[in-house]
Each structure stands twice: as structure tokens, then as C-alpha cells.
Amino acid sequence: MNRTNRFEFIVGLFMLAGIAAAVVLCLNVAGLSFAGNSDNGFDVTADFDDIGGLKEMSPVKIGGVRIGRVSSIIINPQTLSPRVTLHISGKFRGKLSAETSASILTSGILGEQYIDLTPGFDPKSLSEEECEAIGCDPNEKYIDESHVIRDTKSAMILEKLIGQFVYNMGAKSSDSGDGKAEEKPASDAASGKKEQ
């Protein structure tokens, strides 16, 4: 009996270790952790016309490298457009210029959507006069807490692109049909002249 109890105890420990490993794996795949938000990151917002299938927890990347995640998506009450809040890793505080743009892209044809940040010019290279001449705020040279990214590009939605393509093809075929109808009387008139 003693040997059976020890065997069951060891099997139980292995089962608990397996369950704990599965939980840690699931959290890593989802981009979560037990520690919470301990990276000392900061939040910025961006307004888009259409976010497509973008979801909370979607990655934020620069050049394909993940630097953050989407922390919330709401409707901006003033403009009634989607407002996306991005949580960016603290390693990038003071390194992204205020002229950074945000685009919603898709991984592959039908993959997940993510936000791609394109860093703007380096504001250290401009004087205050040059910055004012091109329309940037000389006091706001880097993205920091509660910054609003103004230069955004909305998601390309496959259904809208297909619908636009079909509509344009239909418009071209109806235009070419009208052109043939107009040419026919002209060719009849020309053939009539030859007969006379």
C-alpha cells in the first residue's frame, strides 16, 4: 500500500507540472504574463477611419519586430471613428519621433491584423525654426505618454476591394457597350457611302 501511495503521489506531481507548463505556454502564445504590465511602457492613441478586424491584444510592430500591443479600441465620441490605444514597451520611450505614422496591416492574405509604426524623421536634427517651418510642434519631438498619432492609414478590407473591383469592371463593360453602339451607325454610314 505504501508503494502504491508513493506512485500515485509522483504521478500527481507530474500531472500538476504538465498543467502548469500548459498554462505558461498558453499565456506566452497570447502575449500575457502573470507579472502584468511591468515593462514600464507607455500608452499612445491613434484614430483610424476603419480598423477592419483589428482586435485588442494585437501586436504593434516596427519593421516586423513586436514593440507593443493594442490595449483598447473604443469609438471617439467627437469624431465617431475608432480610437485605438497602443501600449508600447518602455524601451522605446523618447526614441520614436512625434512624426511617427501608424498603419493597419495584415500578416499574409488572411492572417491577423496588426499595427505597423513607421518612425518619422529624427527631431534632433532640426532646430526649433525648421521644425515650425514644416509644421511640427517644437516642444513635442518624441512620442510619450498620451501622445496622439495623427498620421494613420486604415486597414485594407478584402471585401471592399473585391466589391470595388467588380463595380469598376461592370462600369467598364457598360461603357464599352455604349461605345460599340455608337460606332455601328458610323460604320453603316460609311458602308452606305461606298455603295453609292
Image: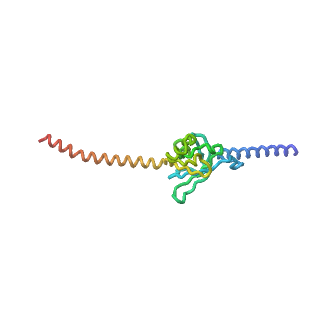
Q: Quadrant of the C terminus?
A: top left
Query: Taking 39 as reference, is 7 left or right?
Result: right
Q: Nearer the viewer, residue 138 or 166?
A: 138
Residue 184 at x, y percent in the picture: 23, 45
Left or right: 4 with respect to 140?
A: right
Residue that sits furthest to the left in the current view: 196
Which color scheme is applied? rainbow
The extreme right residue here reads 2
Number of callouts: 0
Q: Residue at x 72, y 44 (%)?
A: 21
Decide which of 42, 112 is in the foreground and name it.
42
Task: In the displayed orientation, state which residue is furthest to the bottom.
Answer: 77
Q: Is residue 39 left or right of residue 130?
A: right
Residue 125 screen position, x and y as percent: 56, 40
Whether residue 107 is visible, yes or no, is no
Residue 135 visible within the image: yes
User: Residue at the spot x=42%, y=48% of the render?
Assistant: 164
Foreground pick, 114 / 186: 114
Q: Is residue 65 above or below residue 47?
A: above
x and y, in percent, of residue 174 in the image: 32, 48
Percent coordinates x, y for residue 173 in the rendering: 34, 46
Frontmost residue, 134 versus 34: 134
Up the image or down, 84 lies above or below 66; here it is below
